[in-house]
Amino acid sequence: MTTEARRAQLLAYGRQHFAEYGYEAMPMDAIAERAGVSKGLLYHYFGNQRGFYMETVRAVTDEVIAITEPPADQPFDQAFRTMVTRFVGYVQEHGAIYTALVRGGLGSDIEVNELLDRVRTTTMSRILARLDIHQPSALSQIAIYGWVSLVENACAEWALASGASPDQLVDFFISALEPVLDILQSEQCP
């Protein structure tokens, strides 16, 4: 197995482990035993348990950023729906780790918060770029950040409780952005 394939395999295990047990539930040797690898192998790839955890978080946030890139060849409305649909699909498929990070990391871990905030600010930047807004006002930034936070937290709740279809959720998120778009458009028109 190649180095990258082994690392990816360990990170896949990390997603499963940290989603189920959290960061502090067991020591590195127990994690290695459950993963079926030596503790030394985990240390080789990640340095320590914290490194393994943070690389798992980074892999998840990098993946979310990658899958939510809006298609450049689509108009804003269509590209935005694609972005939201992909995000909801990601949460549907990876709900356990997503919820563990969003609900477990907020307020308790500065480094995890920074990685999660990178997802939020990337989403904000993408929306502003697609709308050709280069210097948004404070109100515009707050409005978009609030919408991103709504989507993030509603998806975490949905992953735990279900009840709504993915299409219903996407439609709700699209409609929830309309007041934000009104604010952005009103600021662009003198």
Image: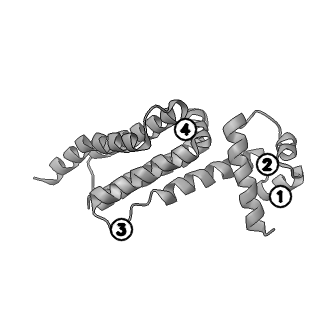
Q: Position of residue 24 (x, y in %)?
A: 74, 34
**Do callouts 2 and 1 mark residues in contact (Cβ within 8 Å)?**
no
Q: Secondary structure at mark 3?
A: loop
Mark 4 crowdedness (10 Å alpha carbons): few <14, some 14-19, many ≥20: some
Q: Earlier in the sequence, mark 2 or mark 4?
A: 2
Instruction: Report if residue 142 is visible in the image.
Output: no
Q: Nearer the viewer, mark 1 or mark 4?
A: 4
Q: Nearer the viewer, mark 2 or mark 4?
A: 4
**Do callouts 3 and 4 mark residues in contact (Cβ within 8 Å)?**
no
Q: Distance of mark 3 from mark 2, alpha carbons? A: 40 Å
Q: Secondary structure at mark 4?
A: helix
Mark 2 crowdedness (10 Å alpha carbons): few <14, some 14-19, many ≥20: some
| Number of the label disc, if any, that sits on residue 58 | none
Q: Which residue matches tag 3?
A: 72
**Do callouts 1 and 3 mark residues in contact (Cβ within 8 Å)?**
no
The N terminus is located in which quarter? bottom right
Q: Distance of mark 2 from mark 1, alpha carbons? A: 8 Å
Looking at the image, residue 55 sits to the left or right of residue 125; the answer is right
Q: Nearer the viewer, mark 3 or mark 2?
A: 3
Q: Which residue matches tag 2?
A: 48
Q: Which residue matches tag 1?
A: 44
Does 159 appear above or below 130?
A: above
Q: Earlier in the sequence, mark 1 or mark 4?
A: 1
Residue that appears at 21% across and 44% down: 183
Q: Amino acid at mark 1?
A: His
Q: Distance of mark 3 from mark 4, alpha carbons? A: 28 Å
Q: Which residue matches tag 4?
A: 102
Instruction: Report if residue 46 is visible in the image.
Output: yes
